[in-house]
Image (cartoon, rainbow, N blue to C red):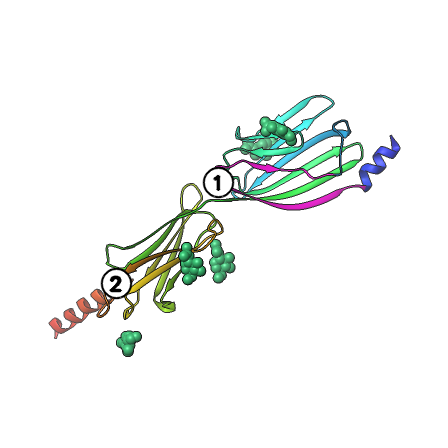
C-alpha cells in the first residue's frame, strides 16, 4: 500500500494535445496513458471547460461503480476516451482527463477545435458596392481582393447566435480600372482559397463606403450656411 501511495505521488504525468473536428462530426478525445489494463483503473474524471466559461464533469469511480455526469447528452465515455457526437462550436475548449490508476495519476489536457466551413458570396449590395461575405464559419475566414486596394476595403466580423463568424468585406475603391474583381477567401476547411469573381464597369466607377452620409450632411450644412447669408 505504501508503495502504491508513493507511486501515486511520483508519477503524475501531464500530456497536452490538440484535436480538431468538423462541426457535426464525432470528436474522440483519448486519455493518453502508458499501456494500462482495465483492472489498473481506479477512477476516471473528464472535465470540459468551454470557451464561454461554463464546464461539465464526467466522473466514474470503478470500485463503487459510481458515476457523476452533468455533460450534454451528446457526450459520452467509451473506456477511457471521451466522445462528443454532432460536435458544435460551443463545445470548443479544454478537456482535461484525470486517470487515477494503481500506478499513479495521469493528467491530459486536450484543446478541442470545431471547424465549420463558411459559405461564400460576392454581390453588389444595396449601395451598389461589391460585397464579399463568408457566412457562418469557424474560425473566421480571411478575405482579400484582386486587385488589392489596401485603403479602400472595410471588413466587418460578427458572431452568429451559433457562435460561428460572418466576415463581410466591402470593396470601396473610387477608381477601378480593372474589369474583373475577385474576392479570395481562405479558411482552414478549404483545401485551396475560394475565389468569386464579378465584372465591374471599366471607367467612372465610384464606390464610396461610409462616405455617403458625411458628404450629404456636409452639403446640407453648406446649403444652410449659404441660405443664412
Ligand atoms: C456540473 O457540475 C459542476 C460541479 O457541481 C458545476 O460546477 C458545473 O457548473 C455543472 N455544469 C453543468 C453544465 O451543469
Ligand atoms: C468503443 O470503443 C471500441 C474500441 O475502442 C469500439 O470498437 C466501439 O465501437 C466503441 N463504442 C462506441 C459506442 O462508440
Ligand atoms: C485611376 O486609375 C487610372 C489607371 O489605373 C490612373 O491612370 C488614374 O490616374 C487614376 N485616377 C485617379 C483619380 O486616381
Ligand atoms: C488570416 O490572415 C492572418 C494574417 O495574414 C493569419 O494570421 C490568419 O491565420 C489567417 N486566418 C485564416 C482563417 O486563414
Ligand atoms: C484562388 O486564388 C488564389 C490566389 O490567386 C489561388 O491561390 C487559389 O488556388 C485559387 N483557388 C481556386 C479554387 O482556383
Residues at marks 1 and 2, CA–CA distance in whole angstroms: 36 Å
Tell whether position 200 is magenta. Answer: no
Tell me, yes or no, if residue 69 can be seen here.
no
Q: Is residue 130 above or below residue 158?
A: below
* Quarter of the render that holds ligand 2: top right
- The residue singled out by tag 2 in the image is 200
Measuring from the top left, give residue 91's x and y in whole percent: 52, 39
- The label number, if any, that marks residue 145 in the structure image: none
Dot 2: within a 10 Å radius of its alpha carbon, few (fewer than 14), some, or many (20 or more) residues? some
Task: From the viewer's perspective, tell me whether residue 197 is left or right of residue 76.
Answer: left
List the single residue furthest toward the right: 2
Foreground: disc 1 or disc 2: 2
Q: Which residues are magenta?
A: 11-33
Dot 1: within a 10 Å radius of its alpha carbon, few (fewer than 14), some, or many (20 or more) residues? many
Q: Residue at x 41, y 47 (%)?
A: 118
- Mark 1 or mark 2: which comes first in sequence? 1
Measuring from the top left, give residue 63's x and y in whole percent: 74, 23
Q: Residue at x 24, y 58 (%)?
A: 127
Check contact, mark 1 vs mark 2: CB within 8 A: no
Please, what secondary structure does the residue beneath circle 1 have?
loop
Tally the marks.
2
Q: Residue at x 67, y 37 (%)?
A: 31
Out of 81 and 164, give the one closest to the viewer: 81
- For residue 184, which quarter of the picture? bottom left
Measuring from the top left, give residue 34's x and y in whole percent: 76, 38
- For residue 229, which quarter of the picture? bottom left
- The residue singled out by tag 1 in the image is 23
Measuring from the top left, give residue 72's x and y in whole percent: 53, 31
Task: From the viewer's perspective, tell me whether residue 44 is left or right of residue 139.
Answer: right
Q: Is residue 116 above or below residue 103?
A: below
Please, what secondary structure does the residue beneath circle 2 have?
loop
Task: From the viewer's perspective, tell me whether residue 218 is left or right of residue 131.
Answer: left
Amino acid at each position: 500500500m505504501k508503495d502504491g501511495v508513493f507511486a501515486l505521488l511520483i508519477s503524475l504525468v501531464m500530456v497536452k494535445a490538440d484535436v480538431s473536428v468538423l462541426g457535426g462530426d464525432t470528436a474522440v478525445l483519448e486519455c493518453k496513458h502508458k499501456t494500462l489494463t482495465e483492472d489498473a483503473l481506479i477512477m476516471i474524471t473528464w472535465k470540459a471547460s468551454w470557451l464561454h466559461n461554463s464546464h461539465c464533469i464526467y466522473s466514474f469511480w470503478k470500485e463503487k461503480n459510481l458515476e457523476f455526469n452533468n455533460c450534454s447528452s451528446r457526450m459520452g465515455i467509451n473506456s477511457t476516451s471521451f466522445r462528443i457526437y454532432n460536435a458544435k462550436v460551443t463545445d470548443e475548449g479544454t478537456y482535461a482527463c484525470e486517470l487515477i490508476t494503481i500506478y499513479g495519476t495521469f493528467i491530459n489536457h486536450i484543446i478541442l477545435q470545431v471547424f465549420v466551413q463558411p459559405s461564400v458570396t460576392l454581390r453588389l449590395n444595396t449601395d451598389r458596392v461589391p460585397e464579399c461575405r463568408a457566412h457562418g464559419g469557424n474560425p473566421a475566414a480571411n478575405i482579400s481582393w484582386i486587385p488589392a486596394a489596401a485603403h479602400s476595403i472595410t471588413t466587418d466580423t460578427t458572431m452568429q447566435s451559433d457562435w460561428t463568424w460572418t466576415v463581410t468585406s466591402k470593396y470601396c475603391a473610387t477608381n477601378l480600372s480593372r474589369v474583373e474583381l475577385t474576392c479570395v477567401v481562405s479558411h482552414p476547411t478549404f483545401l485551396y482559397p475560394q475565389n468569386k469573381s464579378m465584372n465591374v464597369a471599366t471607367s467612372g466607377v465610384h464606390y464610396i463606403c461610409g462616405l455617403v452620409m458625411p458628404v450629404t450632411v456636409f452639403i446640407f450644412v453648406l446649403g444652410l450656411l449659404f441660405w443664412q447669408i
